Image: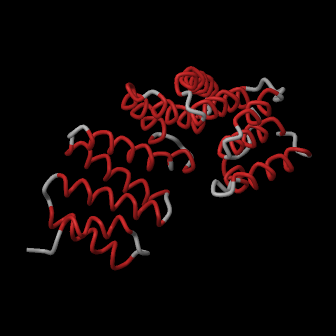
Amino acid sequence: MRMIDQETLDALWDFGAPAESAARFRTTAESSPDRDELMTQAARAMGLQDRFDDGHALLDAVESDSAVVRTRVALERGRLHRSAGDADTSVPLFQLAAATAGEAGLTFLQVDALHMLAMADPTSAEAHTVAAIEIADSAADPRTRRWSIALHNNLGWHLHDTDQLEPALAEFELALDASRAYGSAEQIHIARWSVARCLRSLGRLDEARAIQQELHDTDPPDEYVEEELEALGPRP
């Protein structure tokens, strides 16, 4: 099955500059045998500019019926609807994307679809996230396993916000492990901050303060670190 390597797509993306990304995808698609797959990413970039009708028009013009393209069309159409404020319409599209990807063995896209489904369907967010984690944690390729960082973090905050603090801490620590294995320095920083924040909720203030102070001393300035240090107060 033909599919563009995810690292190749990553190199074309700049989520901070969606207009430029859309132009880059459309230009690359002109001479590519993977035109339809690339156009799904141009549609996603349109959504990031709130150009939802333009994004749907690009997806309407996709002709390929491959499992990869069908998955991406459902996924990106779902994202367009959710970003436009219509989460209810996005849910069956994310479900279709997850099912199509699962049947075709497209683990990266299956995890992406489940991740989006968790955001669009908050009543079942924990179940969707756990399912995505099981796939990501057992994946063979590092790019798919990198999903574990965000997924464990998301589950950690869900548990934290429902006062399940010990399980939340375990998830934040798993996110930290994944960020150290597959992530960036920024992702490690965020994961350590989250561990410390949960420790504060657990009343383990000395441990929380030590982590936040180290982040303050060694990492780039971060207002959230400063807020936590202020909340924790000086060491007794």
Q: Quadrant of the N terminus?
A: top right
Residue 111 drawn at (x, y percent): 53, 36
Q: Quadrant of residue 17?
A: bottom right
Image: 106 above or below 137: above
Image quarter where the C terminus lies is bottom left
Q: Give how far across and how far down residue 76 sits, in percent.
A: 66, 34
Left or right of 194? Residue 45 is right
Residue sitting at 63 percent across and 57 percent down?
Answer: 16
Q: Is residue 164 left or right of residue 65?
A: left
Residue under the image location 66 percent in, 42 percent down:
50
Q: What is the x, y in percent for residue 200?
A: 19, 57
Please tell me which residue is depicted at 74% across the width and 37% down the height of the picture.
40
41 with respect to 91 (left or right):
right
Residue in the picture at 73% in, 54% down: 12
Extreme residue in the left direction: 236
Where on the picture, by quarter, is residue 216? bottom left
